[in-house]
Structure formats: C-alpha cells, structure tokens
Amino acid sequence: MKQSLRLLFVVALAACPAFSTFAAEAKRVLVVTVTTGFRHSSISYAEKTLQKLGEESGAFTVVDFARQPDVVVPRKPNKPRDLPADADDNAKARHDADIAKYEAELAKWTPEVEAQAKAAQAQFDAAAKQSLEKVSPANLVANKIDMVIFANTTGDLPLPDRDGFIKWIEDGHAFAAMHSGSDTFHGFPGYIQMLGGEFETHHAQVPADLVAADTAHPANAALGPKWDLKQEEMYHIKNQDRARVHILWYMQHDPNETATQDFFPVSWCRLAGKGHVFYTSLGHREDLWSDDPNLPGRVNSPEISKQYQAHILGGIKWALGLADGDATPNPDVK
C-alpha cells in the first residue's frame, strides 16, 4: 500500500512541472516581412532578433514567418532628379555621372528584358499572395496565433482578407509593427486607423533625442525619461489623431530641423476594439536590431541595440497582455 502511494506521489510530482509549463505556454506569434515597396536591409536582422527575444524571454514563440518570395524582378532605371539652379560644380559633376549611369542602364532595358520583368512580377505577385495566406483569419485561428508582427513591411500587401484581418485584431488579438509598418497599406484606411498613424516622409539619418511620454509603460523598458540614439532614420507621421493613441516616445522638435520646436511622435500604443496595438517608428538601421559588437558599419552601440530590443519586447509583451501598461490617449503630452 505504501509503495502504491509512493508511486502516485512520484507521478504527481512529475505531472506538476508539465502542468505548469502548459499553463504558462508561450504566446504564438506570426512575423510578416513581405514588402512590395522599399525593402530594408535590416529585415534579416529583425527576423533573427524577434526569434531571439521570444526564446530568451519565454513570453512568446515565433511559430512562423510570412516571408518575401525568392523572385528577382528587374526594375527599369529611374532618371535622376534635375539639379537645383544653385547647384555647385561638385553637385553638377555627380549629377553628370548619375545621368551617364542611368543612360547606360536604360540602354539595357530592351523589349525582351521588359517582358522578362513582367513575367517575374507575375511570379512574385503569386508567390507573395501564397506566403500571405498565413495571415488569413481562418489560418490565424486554425494555428492559434495570438499576435501578428509587421517587421519593416512596405507597400500594399496582397492579404487574402485585409478587412477580416483588422476584425481579427479587433476581436481581441495583438498586433505590432516596427519602422516601415506605417509605410504599408497607404490606400487602406482600415489599416491606418487600426495602427494609429501613417508614414509621410523622412530625411537624412540623424541623432535622435527621445522623450518618454510614459516612463511606466513596458515599452519604456526602464530606460527612463530620456533615450538618445546615435543615428536613425526618423519618420514624419501623418493622419494621427492624438485623441486615439497613447504616445510612448516622442521628440520635441523636428529631427532634421532642430530649431523647429514641435511634437514629433516616435512610438505609441492603442486599443483597437478588444485588440492591443503597439508601434514604433524605430528600426531602420541594422545596428538597432542587432547587438553584435562586430556588426559592420556600426554607429549605435550594442548597448543602444539592447535598449531597442527591450523597447520592442516590452511593447510586444504589453500587446500580448503579458505586461501591464496604460493605453489611455494622452494628447496633452508635449
């Protein structure tokens, strides 16, 4: 009898860790890195970093990617812009060289090459559509996806049901986007409204002195009231109703015209129906995503990279409901 009780006790002990693991099962995340516009070289680093953050934190698992088709589409060369009237001799020399290069490339754009480009584009479009089938509401439900992340996506993505995707978020799921996630679906108001803002333009990369609008939010990641980046491509945002977003990080001036004092949004979160949405305009540079100290061309230190990783991890955990944070609109922040 004692031996039987001892065996039951051992079985119970063995079952407890399994039960605890099951109860705290990591959230399931799908990462989308398809682009139909500009494609950032940092995307491969973004994919690796998101996987790493999930594994190290135990908060989520990247269960799948909707990736770019492996199809190269030849592009017709674009003519360089006209020089301004006050261009100096150096600028004129560079422009002449650019024109010569353009004309040489244009000469290669034969009818045969154009036909090849059209065929490749059709192949790309079909493959992109197939890749993005993973984002259909039916597949998201069937695969028990808790969150979709748009990591530096651009352009009009051929989602199988874009309205259904927005409804999936509003029904209580999570969404996050980094950098050019706001340079996506410019012609789809439902997406822009869900995200809470839209990319307008950017200028040269610059140092950025960020101010925290909410030092307690997980996306602040204990960085404090200020956060300085050595260099980043800072977005100008349009179509943002500040009465509908909770600003997390911002600047108090135009990043390229520092004398122009103004509110300049950088990162925010919001509720979309029952869903949680997190966005950061940061993430253009590879040395923000990657903390590899030997990364070629590094300007931002590995410490800044780790701060960025903590920033997006905090935003992701908030969106997944794993960390508490305020989403009340804060339009008075300035």
Image (cartoon, rainbow, N blue to C red):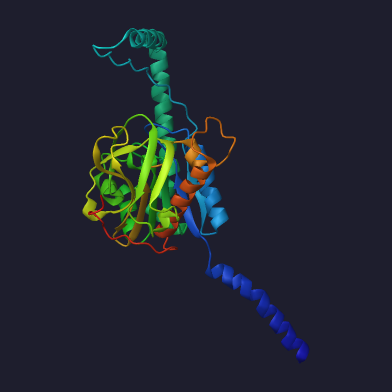
Residue found farthest to the bottom: 1
The answer to whether 229 is drawn above or below residue 165 in the figure is: above
Rendered residue at 34%/62% (across/down): 326
Estimate the x, y position of residue 184 in percent, counting from the top left: 33, 40
On-image quarter of the N terminus: bottom right
**Which of these two is toward me, 47 or 324?**
324
The answer to whether 94 is drawn above or below residue 146 in the figure is: above
Residue 162 appears in the figure: yes
- 255 displayed left or right of 308: left
Estimate the x, y position of residue 256 in percent, counting from the top left: 31, 32
The answer to whether 205 is drawn above or below residue 78 in the figure is: below
Rendered residue at 32%/36% (across/down): 255
- 9 displayed left or right of 208: right
Residue found farthest to the right: 3
**Which of these two is toward me, 148 or 319?**
319
Rendered residue at 29%/47% (across/down): 191
Residue 159 appears in the figure: no
Estimate the x, y position of residue 34 in percent, counting from the top left: 43, 39
Question: In which quarter of the view is residue 141 placed?
Answer: bottom left
Rendered residue at 58%/38% (across/down): 293
Residue found farthest to the front: 259
Estimate the x, y position of residue 236 in percent, counting from the top left: 29, 38
